[in-house]
Amino acid sequence: MARTTLQARDLWADIQTLRERRPLVHSITNVVVTNFNANVLLAAGASPVMTQAHEELEDMVAIAQALVINIGTLDAYAVEAMTIALRAANARGVPVALDPVGAGATAYRNRTLAALLAAGRPTAIRGNASEIMSLAGEAVATRGVDSSAGTEAALAPALALAANHGAVVCVSGAVDHVVAPDGRVLRLDNGHEWMTRITGVGCSLTALVGAFCAVQPDAWRATAAATALMGVAGEIAAEQARARGAGVGTMAALLVDALQLVDEAGFLARARIVDD
Ligand SMILES: Nc1ncnc2c1ncn2[C@@H]1O[C@H](COP(=O)(O)OP(=O)(O)O)[C@@H](O)[C@H]1O
Ligand SMILES: Cc1ncsc1CCOP(=O)(O)O
Ligand SMILES: [Mg+2]
């Protein structure tokens, strides 16, 4: 396994670049998380637009700096939209982040993901452990949209998935694993268990992956920056919520705040890159 040379300060540089450049991120996402995802993107410094109208997809992809495809709430119209947008993004060199929500839960999701991966190539794929294991061909059943496995078990499947599709793969969980098609692996030990009790945090991480791919051409480093930022912000939000005797509802708002307000010292003090 290749050792990482990435440092937290490299990831902080990408966070600053995102805040300065404010890339337009086009998302085709699910009906549960659309508003939260848009707020997360805005807080981190990106400019979100959500649309799946077939009539405007190619025009929107043409002005976007990244595309996010999220299969959380599927129907035939949305699947066609994802396929059109993926092809358009690939043709224009616009980076694509894919969230395989619920992969391994139903045959329809698995079929749809196979068709999307046959139609085009995502730049990065971000899912929880059982979603990534399922996408890599392992016989695993995702529990609705929640993981039924730990991230360590998904490392080998993630490396295979990355190599097979030429995409960076991020497996999120207690320790996040970010792997590149060439075998580079970065582990990030940030976050808080309460993040799993706010809907859309994983989906929003995928949206951030898209945003960072818009400003950092090394998709592995971009995905690491997104993952570190979400983990650090989640930690800050959980701490602040607990300090005031609040729960995960308050934490959701504090998470958006932390994505906006985290500064260099706070980020560098918390970001934990784990080497083997
Ligand atoms: N047990 C945990 N401890 C700390 N952070 C976690 C834990 N589980 C998930 N996270 C964090 O929550 C975010 C969403 O990840 P995850 O829950 O795996 O996604 P999904 O919502 O798609 O299942 C990531 O930033 C991840 O690091
Ligand atoms: C609950 C739910 N059902 C379909 S999509 C969705 C949101 C999943 O969001 P996340 O994976 O970020 O928790
Ligand atoms: Mg998810």
Image: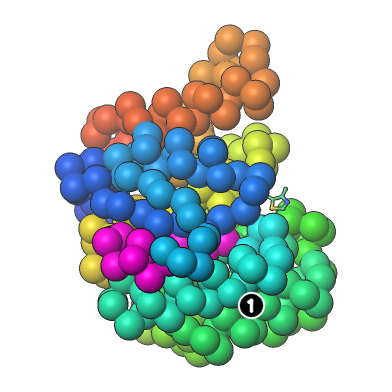
Q: Position of residue 53 (x, y in %)?
A: 51, 61
For residue 19, side relative to residue 256 (left or right): left
Q: Which residue is nearer to you in this view: 207 or 229?
A: 207
Q: Is residue 62 above or below residue 136?
A: above
Q: Quadrant of residue 20?
A: top left
Q: Residue at the front extreme?
A: 55
Highlighted magenta segment, given as a residue range = 57-70
Label 1's element? helix
Q: Residue at x 61, y 66 (%)?
A: 78
Q: Is mark 1 within 8 Å of ligand 3?
A: no
Q: Which residue is nearer to you in this view: 101 or 232?
A: 101
Q: Dividing the image into 4 quarters, which one contains the C terminus?
A: bottom left
* Residue type pointed to by label 1: Leu
Q: Residue at x 70, y 37 (%)?
A: 197
Q: Position of residue 85 (x, y in %)?
A: 45, 72
Residue with the mark numbered 1: 113
Q: Which residue is nearer to you in this view: 140 or 114?
A: 114
Q: Position of residue 101 (x, y in %)?
A: 66, 61
Q: Quadrant of residue 248?
A: top right
